Amino acid sequence: MKYEVDELGFYGEFGGAFIPELLHPNIEELSTRYLSIIYDEAFQKEFHYLLKQYVGRPTPLYFAKRLSEKYQTQIYLKREDLCHTGAHKVNNTIGQILVAKKLGKKRIIAETGAGQHGVATATVCALMGIECIVYMGAKDVERQAPNVARMKMLGAEVRPEYSSSQSLKDATNAAMRDWINNPEDTHYIIGSVVGPHPFPDMVARFQSVISEEIIAQLEGEKPNYVIACIGGGSNAIGAFYHYMQDVEVQLIGVEAAGKGVDTKETAATLALGSPGVLHASRTVMIQDKDGQVIEPHSISAGLDYPGIGPIHAHLKETQRATYLHATDEEALQAGFELSKLEGIIPALETAHALAILPKQPFQPDDIIVFNLSGRGDKDLESYMKHL
Ligand SMILES: *Cc1c(COP(=O)(O)O)cnc(C)c1O
């Protein structure tokens, strides 16, 4: 069974590049060149140097003793929360800024919802001394003031989008328009395994360092389960990547159910969605009967996305991975629990993955790896409201 992208940019029936004619030159340049750029020896050397000395990799694989005792199983935490900027997102932005440099680009654009990807992008632009423009829905600019301040401090320009719902999808459209208008000098850094081919594959390859490290750190032992939360799906694919062909390892993605999958306030895309084209890629999305995107809801801004990376749609279709979901309330409880039992405050996104522990029957000798995608400092206000 093949789970990787094919020559046309598809994962089974999902993926592809459904782009306006005017974007063809940009996408064509990137898809013909990305693999030879990434696997060039000098590129790999610089990428791994920065991951080590700037991001702080390898991140630890920590055996969570007290959490394991509570659930009578063996739980490891892959500590992406210890990456510079506090989450896995920087693995991808480091990779893409190096690609942009190789392509001779002088200007970076990005879209962001919660602001985490905007911060990770502004960070690498500062590192390289490259101009950075981050599109953000006007509502999100207001809601995510600390991250807006971070981006500005890092030298990025934040451009609020006032059209339509003033949220992530409008920021994405604005970034696409900018890219169409500036094809020569600009690279668009997409923040997850979403968007037109080759972005999902390129982002997956950069994040795959996570599973590469897990394999080395487990020293020959094989996990029974690898579990991660899913927004667009990049931290999950990073953790799954080198296990994808080994069907003895069960892969579990956890979506945000928001207030519940039986309510309208949810972000559980694979549980409730249907095939459609979103963000220039054929995938599964939450839509009404006219094909209009339904605004998602999740307590965690990073999971508040109406679609999902096409590779996850394919992994679900082929039953290679299993997709569960957890509500806002369950995630909050899991976040409190990890904090008290292990002294680690997880991001609310990450807490969704941990929230399946009370609901899933694991065996005492099961080895379970949770990808701890980010740290919870940014979520303290939400946690405190519910303490
Ligand atoms: C952005 C984010 C996510 C969701 O994005 P994926 O692409 O699904 O990984 C998950 N966890 C944290 C901490 C994030 O910042």
Image (cartoon, rainbow, N blue to C red):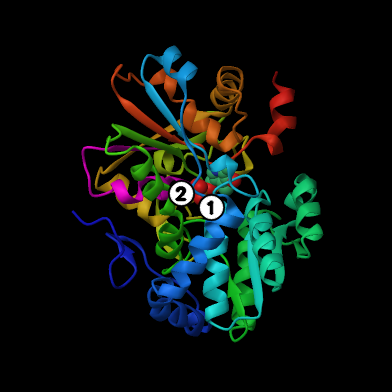
Identity, as a three-letter code, of the amino acid under mark 2: Gly
Task: Please indicate, yes or no, whether residue 284 appears anywhere in the rendered image.
Answer: no
- Label 1: state its secondary structure: loop
* Label 1 neighbour load within 10 Å: few <14, some 14-19, many 20+: some
Q: Which mark is residue 58?
A: none
* Closer-to-camera residue (196/89): 89
Q: Quadrant of residue 172?
A: bottom right
User: In this picture, which residue range is highlighted in magenta?
Assistant: 234-253
Q: Position of residue 77 (x, y in %)?
A: 47, 32
Q: Position of residue 196 (x, y in %)?
A: 45, 68
- Image position of 44 with respect to 380: above or below: below
Q: Position of residue 154 (x, y in %)?
A: 77, 60
* Label 2 neighbour load within 10 Å: few <14, some 14-19, many 20+: many
Q: Give the mark nearer the N terminus: 1 vs 2.
A: 2
The answer to whether residue 297 is magenta is: no
Q: Quadrant of residue 16?
A: bottom left
Residue that label 2 marks: 233
Disc 2 C-beta below 8 A from ligand 1: yes
Identity, as a three-letter code, of the amino acid under mark 1: Val
- Label 2: state its secondary structure: loop
- Image position of 78 with respect to 385: above or below: below
Q: Which mark is residue 293?
A: 1
Residue found 56% across the figure and 37% down from its top: 349
The count of marks equals 2
The answer to whether residue 250 is magenta is: yes
* Closer-to-camera residue (240/124): 124
